[in-house]
Image (cartoon, helix red, strand yellow):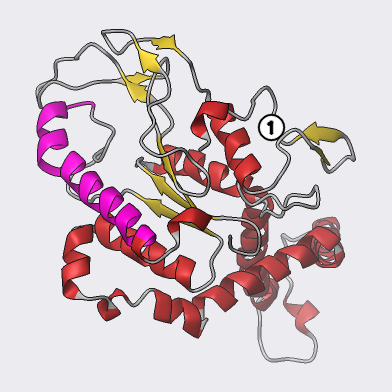
Amino acid sequence: MNSGKPRVLLLSATSGAGHVRAAEALEKAFLARGDSTVEHIDALRYVSKLFERAYDKAYLAMVRRAPELMGVLYERTDQPWRHLRPRLALDRLNTRRTLLEQLDDGRRALDDAPAVRSLDRFQDMAYSLITSPRIREALDISQEPPALRDQYGMSLFGQATLAGRRLLEAGATVVSVFWDEIQTANSAWDTHFSHFERLKDELLPGLDRAFSTLLVDLEQRGMLDDTLVLCLTEHGRTPRLSNTVRGAGREHWSEVYCNLVAGAGIARGRLVGSSDKNGAFVKDDPVSPKDILCTTYHLLGIDPHQTIPDRLGRPIRLVADGDVHPRLLG
């Protein structure tokens, strides 16, 4: 095992902004550490930090234009107040000055906040990844034999999966590979139209080549036993087709769907659970998404039923209502 705990390679068969956000949330959940804390980036606060950067620029622009904005016809003179516009009353000027002071006070308080300082640390970590020679080396898939690259499939997903394996070799512990296409809007696995054509011509061949080659490649390199490979999605497709002008499609369906898991203690060649004959509902041995998450934590050496404190100090279960599924384990 890698330092006693397996790595995680998360393949997300999903597309679209909302879908990607759901997959990113799952990835963050996998970053839990064994000391009962969760190391994560608070997206909202990070966005707030970026907004603060934008505010800084707007603030500087406002300061530079202060004479104009505050009603001063700016000239190079030692007595600019002589150029106040007559219509600008003194109380309005004082109000604007008070507002500026409030902005300055708020900015200083924000700069001193521990949460903002921690965001600076996360930003530094992100920049260190971007500029890391090891990351640059790992992402250089041109170093791989052309025959192996072809086995993964000369598609964006195939080559990204190969890059994911190289990132694991470089020391990464959690790697996500998102399925992505640029041919049509609302494309990839969200098959609301042309369902059968897209599965046959682009989706299934690309996934089959990349996923199967990855497992064989990891096995040959002695990495499969300490790499947990998860090929996940967030929902299935309706058992009944919907007719569209662009061809028959299948809509969103959450009652039953499947995921693929391998490596790091997962049983080989085992099918767990089944659906009814129409593929509409679970027939037996159901596995919930929270069961998958609990089993993943278990394989990572983390108790999925432990509690972690939220920002108010309240104990929150790491995974609520899920259990480690014994039939998934080898």
Of 193 and 327, which appears nearest the observer?
327
Where residue 7 appears, as percent x and y from the top left, is 54, 57
In screen coordinates, is 27 left or right of 102?
A: left
The magenta region covers 192-219
Main SS of the magenta part reads: helix
Q: Residue at left 44%, top 11%? A: 284
Q: Is residue 85 visible?
A: no
Q: Is residue 127 visible?
A: yes
Q: Residue at left 86%, top 66%? A: 112
- Residue lying farthest right? 313
Task: Give the quarter of the figure containing the N terminus.
Answer: bottom right
The answer to which quarter of the image holds residue 48 is: bottom right
Q: Which residue is mark 1?
A: 319
In screen coordinates, is 233 left or right of 65?
A: left
Of 143 and 195, which appears nearest the observer?
143
Where residue 45 appears, as percent x and y from the top left, is 69, 53
